Image (tube, rainbow, N blue to C red):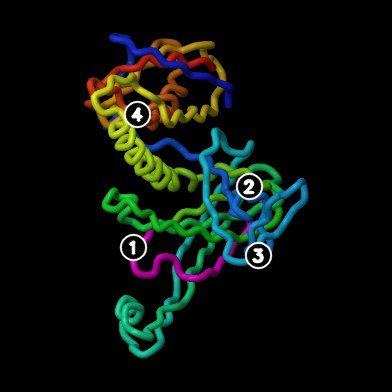
């Protein structure tokens, strides 16, 4: 991953290679897993008996109980890769209580109870030796991913794996309490080694959720931006700048000119790149730039579309 910087300048025209947002999908989303402890968040570096392990004053501490977990975006994955195959997700739901009917009915009636478990099985094969491995299994309300709701109702379960040996398939079986039992859910799995997310063939499955979450947060910020600047004129303000994930470092220019077309909602609609990028690298750069978010340009308090120049330095 090259080191890079970006600065901004409002411009009128740049020519060369324009790519429409209609052709775009959210970029990969390297993730940092965090645990809340005594009012502070700490990076989860390991898992023991299903409980997060964090470093406090340089010492490992197992956090016991119902510890809230959260995530933040990172710029890059850990330095290797792994493959997850034979992934299966299922569950057995047991309903008991006053009413022996459907899960939804039983859970909504007085003294009705719904219970059971969810189960995940998979095979994980790492390209290199990995130590202190664990997975984070996410379940998200499907309506949030589709933009039908602003509440993700995200749940995270964690499971220790131990060490993975290069090119040796390791079987995983994980049973846990039910995920979002009364709504349709979308699930995905992230793999970590010593707290660093390892890129797998399933990592792209997380991108839709994280991009949707960032858009939801951004929408609230835009409303506040407009409310706080009634009748004012303000330039674009970047709120999320995602660096591209580049596997091929060969042939990268020292600097590259780019232009972003940003609409009145602060979303990038088109990307125009100057010459100089290798063909294999260009899609990753465009994919990342189209995920950038802005507080929109304001003219007398009204949000308007704008163009912004972005000199990228690799």
Residue located beneath label 3 in the image? 64
- Residue at image coords 49%, 45%: 203
Q: Is residue 179 magenta?
A: yes
Closer to viewer: mark 1 or mark 4: 4
Residue 184, numbered circle: 1
- Residue contact between numbered discs 3 and 2, judged by CB atoms under 8 Å: no
Residue located beneath label 2 in the image? 43
**Disc 4 packing (10 Å; few <14; some 14–19; many ≥20):** many
SS category of the residue bearing label 2 = strand
**Disc 2 packing (10 Å; few <14; some 14–19; many ≥20):** many
Q: Position of residue 36 (x, y in %)?
A: 59, 54
Closer to viewer: mark 4 or mark 2: 4
Cα separation between marks 4 and 3: 40 Å
Q: Is residue 208 magenta?
A: no
Q: Position of residue 172 (x, y in %)?
A: 59, 62
Cα separation between marks 1 and 4: 33 Å
- Sequence-wise, the earlier of marks 4 and 3 is 3
Closer to viewer: mark 2 or mark 1: 2
SS category of the residue bearing label 3 = loop
Please identify the quadrant where the N terminus is shown: top right
Residue 269 lies, with reference to residue 151, above or below; the image says: above
In the image, which residues are magenta? Answer: 167-186
- Residue contact between numbered discs 4 and 3, judged by CB atoms under 8 Å: no
Q: Position of residue 262 (x, y in %)?
A: 30, 24
Residue 180 lies, with reference to residue 283, above or below; the image says: below
Q: Position of residue 135 (x, y in %)?
A: 58, 55
- Residue at image coords 64%, 62%: 51
**Disc 1 packing (10 Å; few <14; some 14–19; many ≥20):** few
SS category of the residue bearing label 4 = strand
SS category of the residue bearing label 1 = loop
């Amino acid at each position: 991953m090259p080191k890079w910087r970006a600065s901004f300048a409002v411009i009128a025209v740049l020519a060369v290679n324009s790519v429409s947002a209609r052709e775009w999908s959210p970029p990969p989303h390297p993730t940092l897993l965090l645990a809340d402890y005594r009012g502070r968040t700490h990076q989860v570096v390991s898992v023991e008996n299903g409980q997060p392990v964090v470093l406090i004053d340089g010492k490992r501490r197992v956090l016991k109980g119902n510890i809230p977990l959260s995530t933040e975006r990172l710029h890059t994955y850990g330095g290797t890769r792994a493959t997850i195959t034979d992934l299966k997700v299922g569950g057995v739901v047991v309903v008991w209580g006053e009413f022996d009917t459907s899960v939804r009915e039983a859970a909504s009636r007085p003294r009705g109870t719904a219970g059971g478990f969810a189960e995940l099985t998979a095979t994980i094969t790492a390209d290199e030796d990995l130590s202190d491995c664990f997975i984070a299994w996410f379940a998200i309300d499907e309506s949030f991913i589709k933009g039908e709701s602003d509440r993700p109702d995200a749940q995270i379960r964690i499971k220790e794996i131990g060490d993975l040996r290069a090119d040796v398939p390791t079987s995983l079986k994980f049973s846990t309490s039910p995920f979002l039992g009364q709504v349709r859910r979308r699930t995905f799995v992230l793999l970590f080694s010593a707290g660093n997310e390892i890129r797998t063939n399933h990592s792209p499955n997380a991108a839709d959720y994280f991009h949707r979450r960032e858009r939801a947060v951004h929408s609230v910020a835009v409303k506040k931006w407009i409310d706080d600047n009634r009748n004012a004129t303000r330039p674009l303000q970047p709120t999320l700048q995602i660096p591209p994930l580049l596997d091929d470092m060969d042939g990268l220019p020292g600097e590259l000119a780019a232009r972003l077309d940003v609409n009145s909602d602060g979303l990038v609609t088109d990307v125009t790149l100057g010459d100089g990028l290798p063909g294999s690298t260009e899609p990753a750069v465009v994919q990342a730039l189209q995920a950038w978010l802005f507080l929109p340009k304001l003219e007398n308090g009204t949000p308007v579309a704008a163009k912004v120049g972005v000199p990228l330095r690799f």
